[in-house]
Image (cartoon, grey):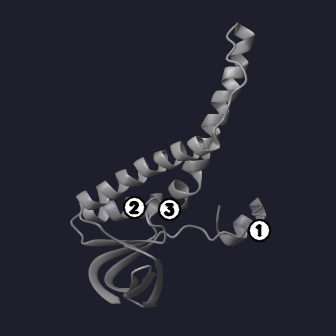
Amino acid sequence: MSTEIKTQVVVLGAGPAGYSAAFRCADLGLETVIVERYNTLGGVCLNVGCIPSKALLHVAKVIEEAKALAEHGIVFGEPKTDIDKIRTWKEKVITQLTGGLAGMAKGRKVKVVNGLGKFTGANTLEVEGENGKTVINFDNAIIAAGFPSDPTAVYSARRSARLGLH
């Protein structure tokens, strides 16, 4: 099934830069569509990167702090971890944050289209998603798709300067 949308602004990518840009455009009264490959807003950082890893690091820090308190006379004993409960808690943190972004998008009337977007013309973006293809015709586009991942690449200061990443 193919759907067609006409909008003033399309934002490709719903990470911190993308959703901020989309929300600002909407606040300025522009009809805005945001395209995101994940099923929730927030991009890599919120869905699978920064936030999930920080949640897990927090658990590790609490365990270490509890051990350190033994020097001050407070002993908790050996921690028992339930990895399934920890994962559930981590997912709850992500769900709360992505839910907040979804609410902000809805409140601003920003339309969210899930899938991978590809420019097919100067003012056309085609999105392949689970529900089929969506063609977005737009007046303006903001590309906030992040930096492509290449785990084999090492970005030294010299290489970053050549790429214009400084």
State the SS at label 2.
helix
Q: To which residue does mark 2 refer?
A: 19
Q: Amino acid at mark 1?
A: Ala
* Mark count: 3
- Does residue 79 appear left or right of residue 130 in this picture? right
In three-dimensional space, the C-alpha distance between marks 3 and 2, rounded to whole angstroms, equals 9 Å
In three-dimensional space, the C-alpha distance between marks 2 and 1, rounded to whole angstroms, equals 28 Å
Q: Amino acid at mark 3?
A: Gly
Q: Position of residue 62 (x, y in %)?
A: 63, 28
Q: To which residue does mark 3 refer?
A: 43
Q: Position of residue 164 (x, y in %)?
A: 65, 69
- Does residue 65 appear left or right of residue 37 in this picture? right
* Observer-nearest of 88 and 11: 88
- Does residue 132 appear left or right of residue 83 in this picture? left
- The numbered dot on residue 153 is 1
In three-dimensional space, the C-alpha distance between marks 1 and 3, rounded to whole angstroms, equals 21 Å
The first of marks 2 and 1 along the sequence is: 2
State the SS at label 1.
loop
Q: Residue reaching furthest top? A: 73
Q: Residue reaching furthest bottom? A: 121
Placement of 15 over or under 84, stated as above or below: below
